[in-house]
Image (cartoon, rainbow, N blue to C red):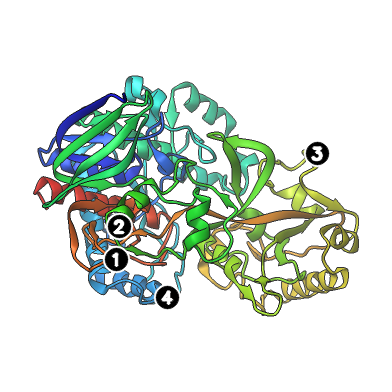
């Protein structure tokens, strides 16, 4: 017979990313007793694997630096990007609460944020800003976590022990060969962690210090209900025992998205998603739990998309590891083509927008028009920039397609040689003209910032002309889910009949974004999840 344990608490939180930790912390600061359940052996979720950026308009740090911003500007900007898919009230709730969430964290924990000069993803739109809305936590010394440091989820990409300002000064995202290795070694020996691990680590420390009861390797599998609403969560431990957590004030679901669940992706998502970049435990557990009691859904057609590539044999958490394709598509001397050997997008534009182009359907061929796709570049690019884990000067690996001519490269890829040659010739002509007439690459401040800044004449446009030529296969990936349980701006979950399910909340990628498909700037989903988590936690504690 399976052992059953029942415990009582005020609030139970499912998940351990930034949204979950912020929710737990807000509830605990409101004097609620909080139990947090995490199904893996690690705390941090996708947050710990990320860059740790949070996008918060009108934040205090902007004002301290003399940068003007307002709620109304941010609202106009995000409202344009939502496509009408979410209510103005919910959009405004989250935008207005963002700065309060940051102030709460800095007042209640040891975490400290600083601004970065990164632009919004569409800086030319009304209400957007060229810098200041993107915040990032300062690095953390791992020893501050004590024994919990070994339980902080390992990084998969953003693992450098640097601040983002230091990384940007080195242009390290696109030029890892420029890293200050001596500084990085010194920081590593001192136990520093940066980026998303720092954000998750600071929040974890605050929760531990504040007395949140954290249960690892405990997988929530069902919501417990009574006539008055949700009463808690039933979970199973690594030992196979059943744990029932009865929560009198609220249950907050923040256990990540569903992008690693092939059945859910196939059922709901428009377009292919073959290479997720997020935490492999994001299998839609909380989505399934909510659906079982009639919770409504929203935004399920889409994900937070990101073009990706993969090196055969690499793994993370027992699943294939994918890598972000960023400089390999946006730096001078590279472009992307589809199976028709044609360009199909502004390669330097925000990754979520570029990723959505993989959903384009060709009604004649009855197939996805831009899948598969390849990033095409030449010897000059290969000798100048990194390609995934390859540094300039490294030997060419078997997984990178190489040919002595464009004709040969096309035949290897099984695409039309004449079309590819023509596509490259047209691209080079536009490079010489200094203007991409087809997709306006380089017109936006964003395009020019997320490139080889300082390079003349263009930080993003460069000829492809010197053999050998290369092709990197680019896949449709995702860093999380923008769809999930339908909530209002405070995280209260909606039933399919339009009512609110009493005592049930959702935040982070477990919930549908209150911004719909809108991705305002670097760290948009992460900040949104933390803000809704903060509001949900405060509401359960009665402090909202």
Give the crowd class for mark 4: few <14, some 14-19, many >=20 residues within 10 Å: some
Q: Is residue 427 left or right of residue 12?
A: right
* Residue extending furthest toward the front: 1
What element does badge 4 sit on?
loop
The answer to which of marks 2 and 4 sits earlier in the sequence is 2
What element does badge 2 sit on?
helix
The answer to which of marks 1 and 3 sits earlier in the sequence is 1
**Is the residue under label 2 in contact with that under label 1 (CB below 8 Å)?**
yes
* Residue at x 56% of width, y 62% of height: 355
Residue under pointer 2: 62
Residue under pointer 1: 68
Image location of residue 477, percent across then percent down: 57, 54
Q: CA distance from mark 4 to mark 1?
A: 16 Å
Q: CA distance from mark 1 to mark 2?
A: 7 Å
Q: CA distance from mark 1 to mark 3?
A: 49 Å
Q: Quadrant of the N terminus?
A: top left
**Image position of 407 with respect to 242: above or below:** below
Q: CA distance from mark 3 to mark 2?
A: 45 Å
Would residue 70 be visible to someone looking at this image?
no
The answer to which of marks 4 and 3 sits earlier in the sequence is 4
Residue under pointer 3: 395
The circle on residue 125 is: 4
């Amino acid at each position: 017979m399976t052992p059953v344990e029942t415990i009582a608490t005020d609030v139970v939180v499912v998940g351990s990313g930034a949204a979950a930790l912020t929710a737990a912390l807000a509830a605990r600061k409101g004097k609620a007793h909080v139990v947090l359940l995490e199904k893996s052996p690690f705390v941090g979720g996708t947050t710990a694997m990320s860059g740790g950026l949070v996008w918060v308009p009108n934040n205090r740090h902007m004002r301290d630096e003399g940068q003007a911003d307002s709620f109304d500007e941010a609202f106009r900007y995000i409202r344009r990007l939502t496509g009408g898919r979410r209510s103005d009230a919910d959009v405004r709730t989250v935008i207005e609460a963002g700065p309060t969430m940051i102030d709460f964290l800095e007042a209640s924990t040891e975490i400290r944020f600083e601004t970065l000069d990164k632009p919004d993803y569409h800086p030319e739109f009304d209400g957007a800003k060229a810098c200041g809305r993107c915040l990032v936590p300062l690095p953390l010394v791992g020893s501050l976590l004590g024994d919990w440091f070994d339980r902080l989820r390992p990084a998969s990409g953003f693992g450098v022990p640097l601040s983002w300002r230091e990384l940007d000064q080195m242009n390290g995202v696109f030029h890892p060969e420029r890293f200050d290795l001596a500084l990085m070694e010194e920081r590593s020996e001192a136990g520093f962690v940066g980026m998303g691990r720092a954000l998750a680590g600071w929040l974890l420390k605050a929760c531990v210090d504040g007395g949140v009861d954290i249960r690892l390797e405990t997988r929530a599998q069902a919501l417990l209900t009574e006539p008055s609403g949700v009463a808690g969560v039933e979970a199973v431990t690594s030992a196979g025992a059943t744990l029932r957590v009865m929560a009198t004030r609220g249950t907050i679901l923040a256990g990540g998205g569903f992008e690693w669940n092939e059945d859910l992706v196939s059922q709901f998502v428009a377009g292919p998603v073959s290479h997720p970049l997020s935490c492999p435990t994001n299998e839609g557990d909380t989505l399934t739990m909510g659906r079982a009691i009639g919770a409504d859904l929203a935004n399920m057609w889409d994900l937070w998309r990101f073009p990706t590539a993969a090196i055969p044999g690499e793994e993370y958490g027992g699943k294939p590891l994918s890598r972000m394709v960023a400089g390999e598509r946006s730096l001078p001397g590279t472009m992307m083509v589809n199976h028709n050997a044609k360009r199909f997008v502004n390669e330097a534009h925000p990754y979520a927008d570029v990723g959505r182009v993989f959903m384009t359907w060709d009604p004649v061929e009855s197939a996805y028009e831009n899948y598969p796709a390849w990033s095409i570049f030449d010897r000059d690019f290969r000798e100048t920039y990194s390609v995934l884990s390859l540094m300039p000067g490294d030997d060419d690996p078997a997984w990178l397609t190489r040919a002595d001519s464009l004709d040969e490269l096309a035949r290897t890829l099984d695409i039309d040689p004449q079309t590819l040659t023509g596509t490259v010739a047209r691209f080079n002509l536009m490079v010489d003209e200094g203007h991409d007439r087809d997709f306006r690459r380089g017109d936006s401040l964003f395009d020019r910032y997320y490139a080889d800044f300082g390079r003349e004449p263009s930080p993003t446009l460069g000829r492809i002309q010197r053999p050998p030529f290369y092709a990197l296969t680019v896949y449709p990936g995702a860093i999380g889910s923008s769809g999930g349980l339908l909530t209002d701006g405070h995280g209260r979950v909606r039933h399919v009949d339009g009512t609110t399910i009493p005592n049930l909340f959702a935040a982070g990628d477990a919930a549908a974004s209150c911004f719909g498909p809108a991705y305002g700037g670097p760290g948009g989903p992460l900040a949104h999840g933390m803000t809704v988590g903060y509001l949900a936690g405060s509401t359960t504690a009665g402090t909202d």
